[in-house]
Amino acid sequence: MRNLKKQISSALIILVMAFFFISCVNEKHDEAKSETETDKGAAVEKTSLPYDLENPVKYNMPHNLFEISGIVFHNGNPKQVFAIQDEDGDLFYLGLNDKESKFTKFGGKGDYEDLTIIKEQIIVLKSNGELHMFPMSELNKAEALNVVKLKGMVPKAEYEGLAADEKAGKVYILTKGSKADEQNKATSIYAFDFAADNTLKPAGTFNLAFKEIEALSGEKKVKFKPSALAKNQRTNEWYILSSVNKLLVVADENFKIKAAYPLKGGNFNQPEGIAFDKDNNLYISNEGGTLAAGNILQFKLKN
């Protein structure tokens, strides 16, 4: 009887140990599976960009757009692109295949960085945050009249990005760098409501955290200094371009960062401007270099 009890006791111990071993194995398997699924999810995030950044259609710009900066389309029409270049207060407009461009003067010499169009008004951004605004009806003139200068709209900083969301009736100004951004370790974006009387009313501030960009880009110590932004109307996502780091950051409509893509290869000499056309094709403009003209790269939306 005593031997029988010992046998039963031994059998119970073996069963308990076997159950514990199986549980540990399953737990490790589940953890490994979870990690694999996470890795796959990250891979899906990385490959979800609906554009092939390595195979663009290139359009070389005329010599007077050697230092092309911001670009925009009117109502997304790709037959004519509007652009500025860094040093002159001229608004250029041309077809992507044109060998020459027309232009209308709107200001004197200055560091002009980006432009946008909203409600038939053209707005141009200077690096100090000053805005120049004039109606599209002034095009085809040698010099635009009724140019309104807006100062003091944003804090003192360096600015390179300007965009409009016509559907929402908003304008956004993006900092390239400031002491506040360095302290906060984030890039600031200032939103404005575009009123019926063509004035801008403050409508909030957004931030792009450097650590989040570093984590998603896979690069360490990223000095994120964005040069342009544009909204993809199909997905309601913001595409933010950084020339210094050669990065493309994608965020949701509230600027929550979703992904970051390094701009690799020789296509991106100095990416300064970004835009979408009405078919949601992506365009990035590059300043010229020693052996290259200024250009606009078209990235067609994948089917």
Image (cartoon, helix red, strand yellow):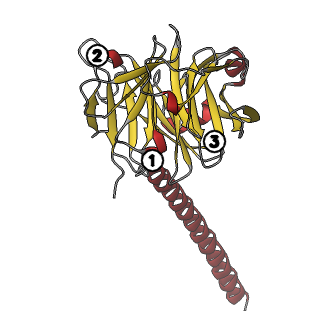
Residue 46 in the image: state x and y as whole percent: 45, 47
Tag 3–tag 2 contact (CB < 8 Å): no
The extreme bottom residue here reads: 1
Q: How many marks?
A: 3
SS for dot 2: helix
The residue drawn where x is 66% and y is 40% is: 170
Q: Which residue is mark 1?
A: 46
The residue drawn where x is 32% and y is 21% is: 294
Residue 200 in the image: state x and y as whole percent: 71, 32
For the residue marked with disc 3, what is the amino acid? Phe
Q: Which residue is mark 3?
A: 255
- 183 displayed left or right of 74: right
Residue 269 tag number: none
N-terminal of the pair, mark 3 or mark 2, is 2
Q: Nearer the viewer, residue 106 or 78?
A: 106
Residue 246 in the image: state x and y as whole percent: 43, 27
- 143 displayed left or right of 213: left
For the residue marked with disc 2, what is the amino acid? His
Q: Which residue is mark 2?
A: 63
